[in-house]
Amino acid sequence: MMRAITTVRTIALCFLFTGLGVAPSSSEPSHFDHSAWDQLLSSYVDSEGRVAYRDAQQTDRARFDAYVEALASAEPDAWPEREQLAFWVNAYNAGIFLAVFQGFSAESLLGRGKLFKFWKFEVAGKRRTLDEIEHKILRKRFTEPRIHFALVCASTSCPQLRREAYVAERLDAQLDEAARLFINDPKRNRFDVERGKAQLSKIFDWFKKDFERDGTLVQFLARYVDDESTRDWLRAGGDIDIDHLDYDWSLNVQPEQRPLRPKRGALERP
């Protein structure tokens, strides 16, 4: 009798979920909630990846700070690999936001040194630099070249900042889309089949070895190029003259949206 009642209850619950358009999830629950970061990105990043830093700073700083606090106390080492990777990419990009709010940017050579090598914020129980997250964690642990299209250092020549958080269950699709968007963007990469020339982002110079783990750089590019004739040319593997475009380090900010600078002498602790 009890088994019959349990069966009826199970059927009723399934019917209820189906009627509401919600299917019971068979996947493991996520260890970390990136929904606050997702909402911030969708609210303050435009279709070109530019950020309304001032609006985010003035309107949603409390929500952002709560997300950063959650990053600080997370323990990602035992999570599945895809979830760890999504966590560290989001942590890097959120760290960039925090640094920009505090008056840092990559717009000058000195500024880049301060931002990437010396400025720190707490992630996963330890105060870390952005270079540590990128080079010692993301590049070293995961050997995933597509991270270079997801990490955004608040500069115009960086990949476009995605208007949603990276999440484990869609990570491959998100990284593939980021790669295609970046490689096919003529502001960042240009291919001249007739002249046998390619002008590529400096990212492909700085991190060339990352893109050549499973073949040549040209073969990697061919996987993501949309134009068929360009793709065939790259796949042919002939002589290609490669130059690298100058990198524009100016802030990826929407018009009149530079953040308010901290008051002199009032340093925020990240």
Image (cartoon, rainbow, N blue to C red):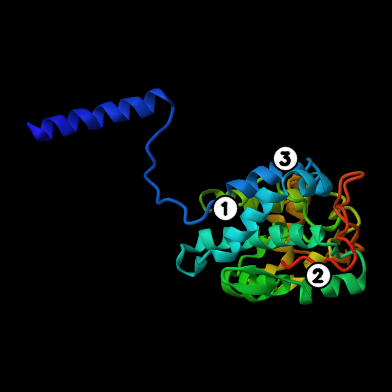
In the picture of the structure, the residue carrying the numbered disc 1 is 171
Count of residue discs: 3
Residue 260 lies, in percent from the top left, at: 87, 53
Q: Earlier in the sequence, mark 3 or mark 2?
A: 3
Label 1, label 2: how far apart the Cα atoms are: 27 Å
- Tell me if label 1 and label 2 are in contact, CB under 8 Å: no
Q: Earlier in the sequence, mark 1 or mark 2?
A: 2
In the picture of the structure, the residue carrying the numbered disc 3 is 43
Q: Residue furthest left?
A: 1
Residue 233 appears in the figure: yes
Task: Determine the secondary structure under disc 3.
Answer: helix
In the picture of the structure, the residue carrying the numbered disc 2 is 115
Amino acid type at circle 2 is Leu
Place residue 125 in its image quadrant: bottom right
Neighbor class of circle 2 (other Cα within 10 Å; few <14, some 14-19, many 20+) is: many
The answer to which of 46 and 214 lies nearer the viewer is: 46
The answer to which of 10 and 247 lies nearer the viewer is: 10
Judge depth for marks 1 and 2 and give the one in front.
Answer: 2
**Residue 119 in the image: above or below residue 177:** below
